[in-house]
């Protein structure tokens, strides 16, 4: 069932048809394809290119096709080349000569450029909703964990104490930037390519502004060759999706560590864990691992897209059909991962006591001990050396700094007094950190207020 049989004398070879066709994956754009066609005929009628009666018949039938595809009475089959051919062919079967006028002043090149933009725009909105939900979950977990002390790490070595709220807050910022990136992409891509024709516009008096506004674009694109060959927004989208996956994957890596018997900072809910077929004791973090693993396919989509585009001369070339499967797969992957990830962290059990015990070990208060000396007039570099010596003594005895008797402190440096214990307590170490963005409770509360406002806007 070909729209372009006129010039051809031979039937297309079956292998060629299958290789060339995109219907098995572009059928998911049927709603956008119909939406675009409805806007196109509305504009054609407004310009007097079609009559109002013709327009009404076409729109009524397009809507009918849409609802039949939706309820399954009309099945999209592989005999058609792509979703555009399918919709137009069915329309023509049902309306005859009237339907044959739908494609006036249009090419599949600007049509597919439009459909893909409409599709991506809808998906960006859905991903944004999922990101927002994740941010809401993170924020409420942050509010519940303002006093949950945990070690902060550098080089995966204990560094300084923070709180679980603060650690979660780092991811909050990442996912917030992800939303910002999607919104930037959405506004940059939001120009309507329809009316570009095959590549050089058309001789019909189309009103491209009208079509653009009917489809909620900010306006029409300004160069017809660019309109049909621009896939920059897909590169940007796949890059933004890759960044979301980086964030999810890093978070998953931490969750896998925290859930291990060595850390035990959290315990994943049974619903988000799996067992082993041989080892009865096992409860594995498969979901976190799978999300980490799926990151690769989204990066792969980005690399493929970049490679597909790099050598294509202007304007449309069939290479561009390769933009779809990988973009769809990346979108599905990110959406699936976001849903599962949100459920996984919302249901995980946070083991506050174990995090606190862990923060007390590993000399996370050593910087604060040095700062204590600085406050008593010792230059920082000397203080650093003194605390280093004390840490060595503690390691030797298998104790933490706050378990060392005052005489021992004084032997190394006479400046120490009884109040050193208060100064290096876990609570003090965290609470003294009140610079904006730091883990101290008041500083965190300020940030949480700002983030709440951000989520309300
Ligand atoms: N299936 C095609 C694609 O995804 C639609 C455009 C076809 N245009 C053409 N001139 N062959 O790119």
Image (cartoon, rainbow, N blue to C red):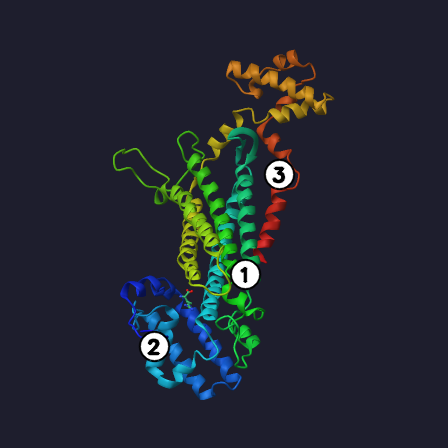
Return the residue nearer the eye: 86 or 315. Answer: 315
The disc at residue 20 is none
- Secondary structure under tag 2 reads helix
Q: Nearer the viewer, residue 206 or 151?
A: 206
Query: In the drawing, does residue 30 fall left or right of residue 125?
Result: left
Packing grade of label 3 (10 A; few <14, some 14-19, many >=20) is some
Residue drawn at x 52%, y 69% as measured from the top left: 193
Q: Percent x, y for residue 393?
A: 56, 14
Say if 76 sits above or below 43 in the image: above
Q: Secondary structure at mark 1?
A: helix
Q: Is mark 3 within 8 Å of ligand 1?
A: no
Q: Position of residue 404 (x, y in %)?
A: 57, 16
Q: Which residue is mark 2?
A: 90
Query: Which numbered disc flags the more N-terminal residue, 1 or 3?
Result: 1
Task: Report which quarter residue 223 is drawn in.
Answer: bottom right
The disc, 3 or 2, on the residue closer to the chain's N-terminal end is 2
The residue under the point 53% across, 51% down is 178
Tell me the CA gap for discs 3 and 2. Answer: 62 Å
Which residue has dot 1 on it? 186
Tell me the number on the disc at residue 438: 3
Q: Residue 86 at x, y = what percent?
A: 35, 72
């Amino acid at each position: 069932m070909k729209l372009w049989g006129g010039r051809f004398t031979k039937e297309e070879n079956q292998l060629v048809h299958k290789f060339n066709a995109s219907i098995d994956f572009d059928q998911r754009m049927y709603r956008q394809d119909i939406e675009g066609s409805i806007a196109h005929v509305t504009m054609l009628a407004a310009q007097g290119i079609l009559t109002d009666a013709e327009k009404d018949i076409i729109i009524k039938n397009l809507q009918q096709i849409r609802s039949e595809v939706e309820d399954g009475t009309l099945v999209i089959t592989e005999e058609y080349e792509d979703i555009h051919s399918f919709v137009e062919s069915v329309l023509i079967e049902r309306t005859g000569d009237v339907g044959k006028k739908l494609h006036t002043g249009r090419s599949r090149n600007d049509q597919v450029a439009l459909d893909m933009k409409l599709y991506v725009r809808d998906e960006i909105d859905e991903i944004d909703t999922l990101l927002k939900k994740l941010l809401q979950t993170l924020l409420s977990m942050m509010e519940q964990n303002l006093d949950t002390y945990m070690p902060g790490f550098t080089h995966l070595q204990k560094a300084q104490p923070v709180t679980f709220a603060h650690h979660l807050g780092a991811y909050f910022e990442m996912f917030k930037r992800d939303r910002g990136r999607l919104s930037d992409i959405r506004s940059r891509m939001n120009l309507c390519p329809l009316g570009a024709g095959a590549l050089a516009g058309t001789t019909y008096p189309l009103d491209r502004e009208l079509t653009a506004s009917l489809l909620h674009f900010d306006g029409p694109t300004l160069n017809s060759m660019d309109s049909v060959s621009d896939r920059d927004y897909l590169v940007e989208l796949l890059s933004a999706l890759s960044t979301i996956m980086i964030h999810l994957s890093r978070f998953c890596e931490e969750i896998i560590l925290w859930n291990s018997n060595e850390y035990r900072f959290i315990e994943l809910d049974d619903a988000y864990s799996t067992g082993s077929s041989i080892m009865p004791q096992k409860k594995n973090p498969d979901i976190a691992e799978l999300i980490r693993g799926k990151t690769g396919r989204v990066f792969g989509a980005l690399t493929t897209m970049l490679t597909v585009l790099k050598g294509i001369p202007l304007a449309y070339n069939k290479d561009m059909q390769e933009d779809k499967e990988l973009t769809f797969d990346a979108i599905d992957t990110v959406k699936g991962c976001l849903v599962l990830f949100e459920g996984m962290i919302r249901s995980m059990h946070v083991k506050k006591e174990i995090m606190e015990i862990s923060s007390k070990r590993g000399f996370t208060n050593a910087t604060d001990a040095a700062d204590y000396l600085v406050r008593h007039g010792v230059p920082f570099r000397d203080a650093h050396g003194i605390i280093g010596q004390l840490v060595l003594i503690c390691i030797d005895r298998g104790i933490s700094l706050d378990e060392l008797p005052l005489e021992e402190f004084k032997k190394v440096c006479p400046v120490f007094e009884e109040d050193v214990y208060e100064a290096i307590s876990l609570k003090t170490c965290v609470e003294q950190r009140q610079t904006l963005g730091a883990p101290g409770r008041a500083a965190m509360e300020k940030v949480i207020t700002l983030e709440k406002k951000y989520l309300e806007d």
